[in-house]
Image (cartoon, coloured by chain):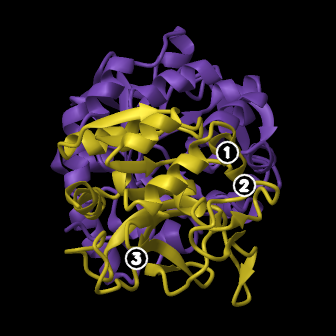
Chain colours: A purple, B yellow
């Protein structure tokens, strides 16, 4: 049976893992390679490393961090941040990434999705979408808007429309982050996730708001997510994938238990 | 020396890294003569079946055919497994090696009255394990491995393991010295490493 994936996300700045609340208030959470291995050993199904400052500071992805993290990691490993061309993506793949996550650069030039996909396969391209509900409108979920540059800039694009376009252009997965719920630990945005999941055939990874095992069960059920991503819940020993998966299994969610 | 064939179908880094981690020596090659002299051959590959056309153009298809006829151990991964069959509906004009009978087909858009997401991405179980499989030695049914693909190979007597997703498909194929895995052993944690170790130690 295909299981629901738990993805541990490492937001990296200057070679260190950091965590913010609603995209600000950054705090230090450790070494990327060390944390990646700890998460994989505890049963995380995938690791995502996002260089959160790459886009707005115009830096390239931290290739050395990627190499060091990938060195003995035998679960899928995604890298995002600062990937603006198929050449940038190639450097990250050479360093040991299995997938790249593109966000602002795909909005700026949607052809990039197909360019990376044609060289490395659609499965290697995740389009990340930072979404904010359109509060004050008749349908805040349906009208939710795409933001770029770490949530700093509105695009005027509807989330559902952009997810569909990304799929048509050859994205392998959608990583949907709700800016409304991110970092709050009050649960994922299940309504928005379900709306996007229904709009596309490719897997949708829910992100933003993980706080308890019940939040994951909720986004896999009501939110129709194929995978869920969390960062802060796993840091500082709050919980790990092993505990989380045991709880999910008790709640009737199909998960891969670590050996 | 294991020849890892590079036919520009995605990223070889992870497969090579896992083989090195297990102590194997590898040579990444596009040269049919290197393939002919290798003790083992690995054909990785993610992406489109069309890219296997390069194997024909480079003369690697013939080299592999000769080598496996002489008993050289062969492991295809993902598209590398699919290539062992007669072909794929993904690129109908490109013939596979035809070592195993049958054609690879896309997952249906619907199965059992429900929408079926495609690609099939994530950790799924090896629902059966054929007792005589050398590749799956020490691996029990029910273990989870990481898949990412939209086309799949049919189930036959050569299937060493099957997985359920929109019906059963071949997760591992094995007959004598010729083997293939649809999932990514290099990304499948301890079970994947066990499988690669089994191959390296054959």
Name of the residue lying farthest toward the top = A58
| Quarter where residue B128 is shown | bottom left
Residue A27 can be seen in this image: no
| Mark 3 / mark 1, whichever is N-terminal | 1
User: Which residue is labeled 1 in the image?
Assistant: B56
User: Which residue is labeled 3 in the image?
Assistant: B125
User: Which numbered mark, 2 or 1, is in the foreground of this view?
Assistant: 1
Q: Does the residue at mark 2 contact the one at mark 1 (Cβ under 8 Å)? A: no
At mark 3, the secondary structure is strand
Chain for mark 2? Answer: A
From what the image shows, is residue A102 above or below residue B46? above
At mark 1, the secondary structure is helix
Quarter of the figure with the C terminus of chain B: bottom left
User: Which residue is labeled 2 in the image?
Assistant: A141
From what the image shows, is residue A92 above or below residue A183? above
Q: CA distance from mark 2 to mark 3?
A: 35 Å
Judging depth in this view, the residue of B83 and B193 nearest the camera is B83
From what the image shows, is residue B9 above or below residue A258? above
| Quarter where residue A28 is shown | top left
């Amino acid at each position: 049976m295909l299981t629901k994936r738990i993805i541990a996300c490492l937001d990296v700045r200057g070679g260190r893992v950091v965590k913010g609340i609603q995209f600000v208030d950054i705090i230090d959470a450790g070494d990327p390679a060390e944390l990646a291995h700890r998460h994989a050993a505890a049963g995380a199904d995938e690791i995502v490393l996002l260089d959160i400052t790459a886009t707005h500071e115009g830096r390239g992805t931290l290739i050395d961090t990627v190499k060091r993290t990938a060195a003995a990691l035998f679960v899928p490993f995604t890298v995002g941040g600062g990937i603006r061309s198929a050449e940038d993506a190639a450097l990250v793949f050479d360093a040991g990434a299995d997938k790249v996550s593109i966000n602002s650069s795909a909005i700026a030039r949607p052809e990039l999705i197909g360019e990376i996909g044609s060289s490395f396969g659609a499965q290697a391209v995740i389009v990340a979408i930072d979404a904010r509900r359109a509060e004050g409108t008749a349908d805040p979920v349906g009208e939710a808007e795409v933001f770029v540059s770490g949530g700093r800039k509105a695009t005027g694009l509807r989330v559902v429309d952009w997810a569909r376009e990304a799929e048509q252009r050859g994205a392998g997965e959608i990583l949907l982050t709700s800016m409304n719920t991110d970092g709050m630990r009050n649960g994922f945005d299940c309504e928005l996730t379900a709306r996007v999941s229904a709009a596309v055939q490719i897997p949708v990874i829910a992100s933003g708001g993980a706080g308890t095992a019940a939040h994951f069960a909720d986004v896999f059920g009501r939110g129709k997510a194929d995978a869920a991503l969390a960062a802060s819940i796993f840091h500082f020993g709050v919980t790990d994938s092993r505990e989380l998966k045991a709880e999910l299994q008790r709640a009737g969610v199909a998960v891969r238990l670590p050996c | 020396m294991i020849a890892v064939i590079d036919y520009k179908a995605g990223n070889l880094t992870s497969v090579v890294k896992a083989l090195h981690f297990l102590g194997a020596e590898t040579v990444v090659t596009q040269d049919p003569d290197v393939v002919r002299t290798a003790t083992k051959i690995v054909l990785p590959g993610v992406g489109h079946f069309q890219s296997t056309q390069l194997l024909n153009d480079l003369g690697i298809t013939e080299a592999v055919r000769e080598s496996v006829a002489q008993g050289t151990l062969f492991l295809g991964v993902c598209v590398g497994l699919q290539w062992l069959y007669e072909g794929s509906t993904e690129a109908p004009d490109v013939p596979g090696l035809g070592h195993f009978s049958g054609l690879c087909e896309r997952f249906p858009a619907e199965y059992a009255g429900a929408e079926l997401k495609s690609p099939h991405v994530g950790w799924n179980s090896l629902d059966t394990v054929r007792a005589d499989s050398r590749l799956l030695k020490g691996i029990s049914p029910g273990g989870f491995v990481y898949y990412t693909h939209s086309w799949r190979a049919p189930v036959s007597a050569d299937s060493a393991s099957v997985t359920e997703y929109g019906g059963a498909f071949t997760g591992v194929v094995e007959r004598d010295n010729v083997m293939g895995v649809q999932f990514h052993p290099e990304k499948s944690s301890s079970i994947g490493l066990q499988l690669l170790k089994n191959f390296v130690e054959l």
